[in-house]
């Protein structure tokens, strides 16, 4: 479903793009279904979320890289808003925790996420609100300057800290997580 929605979204925009699907070894024919829809699809080689992100970024050929979850919790129509900000920042985060953002999730999970984000942003002196969102647009230039080694979800924080320390501009736009 996501591949079809992304194709529909890009059709009127006139951009050249690629869709890269990283599969963690599912048994539901994900790889073949993705390839049948014209996406590049492969089983991840490096362990964890950070490993999947690393494997995909190393394969990406474009000047901008968008990362998102494939379960439709990240609304693909936000891609237009991410792309509209690509000249304003090197990293654009679809944020649940800025004005206009929203997170539909169980209250305990939301509370833990908000507290963790506030604590990490304060501790790391990052002027951001949602550093754990994986729905992002990156300038490929970022990954020419920084390398990342984390293999779990902490990779999201590692990338932002290293990018910020290297002077890259990071911006957040509101996003409704479902």
Image: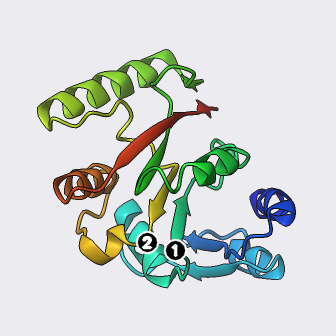
Q: Residue at x 55, y 25 (%)?
A: 101
| Mark nearer the N terminus (2 vs 1) | 1
Left or right: residue 159 versus residue 31 is left
- Give the vertical position of 124 relative to 146 (above or below): above
Residue 13 horizontal/vertical position (percent) = 80, 62
Measured in 3D between alpha carbons, the distance from the residue under mark 2 to the one under mark 1, in whole angstroms, is 5 Å
Left or right: residue 29 versus residue 105 is right
Residue 26 horizontal/vertical position (percent) = 61, 68
Mark 2 and mark 1 in contact? Answer it, CB < 8 Å.
Answer: yes
Q: Quadrant of the C terminus?
A: top right
Residue 28 horizontal/vertical position (percent) = 72, 68
Q: What SS does tag 2 mark?
A: loop
Q: Residue at x 64, y 80 (%)?
A: 41
Categorize mark 2 by other alpha carbons within 10 Å: few (<14), some (14-19), many (20+): some
Residue on which the image places disc 1: 63
From the viewer's side, name the closer residue of 134 and 8.
8
Q: Residue at x 56, y 54 (%)?
A: 68
- Give the vertical position of 19 relative to 122 (above or below): below
Q: Quadrant of the N terminus?
A: bottom right
Categorize mark 1 by other alpha carbons within 10 Å: few (<14), some (14-19), many (20+): few
- Give the vertical position of 66 relative to 154 (above or below): below
Residue 39 quadrant: bottom right
Q: What SS does tag 1 mark?
A: loop
- Give the vertical position of 61 relative to 57 (above or below): below
Across the whole image, how many numbered discs are drawn on residues? 2
Residue 140 is marked as 2
From the viewer's side, name the closer residue of 56 and 175.
175
Q: Residue at x 60, y 24 (%)?
A: 104
């Amino acid at each position: 479903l996501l591949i079809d929605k992304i194709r529909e979204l890009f059709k009127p925009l006139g951009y050249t793009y690629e869709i890269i699907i990283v599969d963690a070894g599912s048994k539901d024919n994900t790889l073949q279904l993705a390839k049948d829809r014209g996406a590049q699809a492969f089983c991840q080689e490096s362990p964890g979320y950070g490993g999947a992100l690393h494997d995909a970024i190393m394969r990406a050929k474009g000047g901008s890289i968008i990362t998102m979850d494939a379960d439709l919790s990240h609304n693909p129509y936000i891609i237009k808003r991410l792309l509209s900000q690509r000249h304003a920042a090197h990293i654009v985060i679809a944020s649940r925790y800025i004005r206009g953002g929203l997170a539909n999730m169980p209250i305990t999970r939301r509370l833990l996420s908000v507290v963790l984000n506030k604590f990490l942003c304060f501790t790391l002196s990052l002027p951001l609100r949602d550093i754990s969102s994986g729905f992002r647009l990156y300038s490929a230039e970022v990954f020419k300057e920084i390398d990342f080694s984390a293999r779990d979800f902490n990779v999201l924080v590692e990338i932002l800290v290293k990018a910020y320390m290297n002077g890259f501009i990071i911006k957040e736009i509101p996003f409704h997580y479902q």
